[in-house]
Image: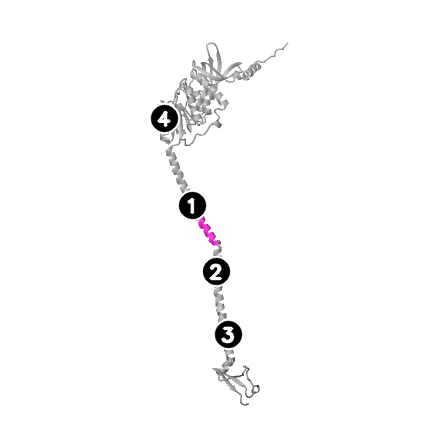
Amino acid sequence: MITPKVFTVSQLNSHIGSMIATDPELQMIFIEGELSNLRLNEHSGHLYFSLKDNKSVVRAVMFSFNVRNLKFRPEDGMKVIMRAQVTVYEPMGQYQLRVEDMQPDGVGVLAMRLEQLKRKLEQEGLFDPAHKRPIPKMPRVIGVITSPTGAALRDILDILGRRYPCADVVLAPVLVQGDAAPAQLIHAVNTFSEYQAADVLIIGRGGGSMEDLWAFNDEGLARAIYACRIPVISAVGHETDVTICDFVSDLRAPTPSAAAELAVPDQKELSDHMLSMLRKAQSTLSAKLNMLSSDTEKLRQLVEARSPQVTIDRREEQLSALAVRMNRSADMRLQLANAAIQKMISKAEALSPLAVLNRGFARVTTGDDKNLSSVEDVNVGDSLLIHLKDGKLTASVTHK
């Protein structure tokens, strides 16, 4: 037999609170009903109220940080749909709803569906920023998926024509609301992707109610955009409108006009930028050339200072001076040699027999050209040669 456990009131309330806190189905629920007993705490900003239907009532609280995000003013008797967590207020032993978001019923049903689909796709990674592709800076072809009769198309074409008229625009005319719209939107995205018929896609429409924009919350469209091989810009409604298409696209634009501005550059801005870059390049090039010219001049001076030509020129000057000195020395030596030779010639001439002959003397030789220096060297009858300065005479010895 099992002995019953004895709880205190606090233990019981805590135990029930733990059971509810660990039940995953109660951690986030969507619930609809009618508001009653609304009370806003002016000090904390928390909102306390009850939610009821025709059979039951449950207490609820919405903390101030969630109250500040409400886009409407709740009132008693208003039918709403809420996203909430079931909790237990242990001091009173009462379970209550901790409300995180609240929408008026009608729109609230759609908001609930949108929130559920958003959470599902986000968990699958369809909104992951890492998957988003950059928009090309200068696209040649812009694909537009929208109604052919809507103001959105006129705004897009006007902006594209004014900012970047060199780009081509390919329109995929589709319905943008109603039951048939999602299928046409999906087909247009898939066709552009399959044939890669554009460099960037703009998909969207003008503003409207949540019901009007609901085609852009289609799960199939979200998956088609995610798989598209062309970068997609979402341009659905006004800036305050949010759809699944905005989350899954590569870039969200607040309006169709803004999407056109984001898709292409401004031709005038490009021209001004290119002109500015050209001027900057010219200025940089001019400064670079001036710097190179200065460096070249410095290098030339350095080369000249260190050039062997300077040494060669100096050596040539030294060699020229040395050659002059050598020539002068050689001339002087030659003159001295000439003077010595002349002196020797004079001495030789003074000692030469010819000089004696010139003074009136004669040289006597025998027939075999031996000089006679004594009468003892000849006999009577010998023939003698007498050498004078201008010729020879023959004589015969007759006596001695």
Residue 162 location in percent, x, y? Answer: 35, 30
Q: Nearer the viewer, residue 326 or 4?
A: 326
Pointer 2 residue: 316
Q: Which residue is mark 3?
A: 341
Whether tag 3 and tag 2 are in contact, CB under 8 A, the answer is: no
Mark 3 or mark 2, which is nearer to you? Answer: 3
Decide if residue 82 is in sight here. Answer: yes
Residue at the disc numbered 4: 155
Where residue 318 appears, x then y in whole percent?
49, 61
Measure the alpha-carbon separation of dots 3 and 2. 36 Å
Answer above or below: position of 131 versus 39. below
The kind of residue tagged 2 is: Glu
Q: Position of residue 223 (x, y in %)?
A: 46, 22
- At horizontal 39% and vertical 34% (from top left) the residue drawn is 270
Helix, strand, or loop for circle 2? helix
Which callout, 2 or 4, points to the residue nearer the camera? 2
Q: Measure the alpha-carbon separation of dots 1 and 3.
A: 74 Å
Marks 1 and 4 sit apart, C-alpha to C-alpha, by 49 Å
Q: Left or right: 218 with respect to 88?
A: left
The local secondary structure at tag 4 comes to: helix
